[in-house]
Image: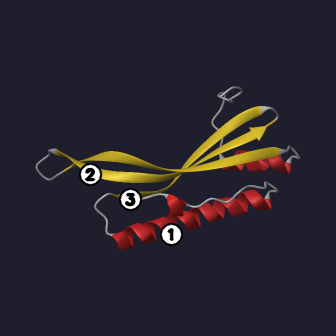
Amino acid sequence: MANVEREMPVRLEDIISWVKEGREVKVNVELTKEDIIQKVLVEAGDAEEIHAYLLTGNFAFKLDGKTYRVSKAYLRGYASESVHVSAANRNIANARLKMDYERLMQAGIRLEQKYFEKLRL
C-alpha cells in the first residue's frame, strides 16, 4: 500500500471536485459484508448483543501517483432478518451504490460497476 494519502479524510465529493478541475483518476471498487455486533441496553439496564452486518463499498482512487481510499457503508442489516428482508436490503444498498456510481460517471470517472449480488447475507 505504498503512496497512500493520509493527510486528510477524503470523500467522494472531494474526488469529484478534483476530476472537475481536470485531474485524471483511476478507481477500483471492492464491496464487502462486515459482520458486527451491536450492544443494546434492554429495559433492565443489561447489555444485549445483536448480530448485524454492514454492506460497504471500498473505493481506491489513484490520482497524481497517490492512492486515496474512501469507504462508505450502504446498509446495516441484521443476522436474524428473513430472506425477503435480506433481499430488500440488498436492493436498497445496490440502489444507493448506483447513485454514487452515477455521480462519479457524471464527473467523468470511468469505473467497473459492481453490486452486492455475490455477497451472502
| Mark 1: secondary structure | helix
Label 1 is placed on what type of residue? Asn
Q: How crowded is mark 2: few (under 14 residues within 10 Å), some or many (20 or more)?
A: some
Mark 2 = which residue? 50
Q: Where does the image place residue 21, in percent across and percent down from the top left?
A: 86, 46
Q: Quadrant of residue 84?
A: bottom left
Quadrant where the image shows the N terminus:
top right
- Residue at horizontal 33%, vertical 58%? 78
Query: Is residue 24 found left or right of 69 in the rendered image?
Result: right
Q: Can residue 18 be seen in this view?
A: no
Label 3 is placed on what type of residue? Gly
Mark 1 = which residue? 91
Q: How far apart are marks 2 and 1 (CA)?
A: 23 Å
Mark 3 = which residue? 77
Q: How far apart are marks 1 and 3 (CA)?
A: 12 Å
Q: How far apart are marks 3 and 2 (CA)?
A: 11 Å
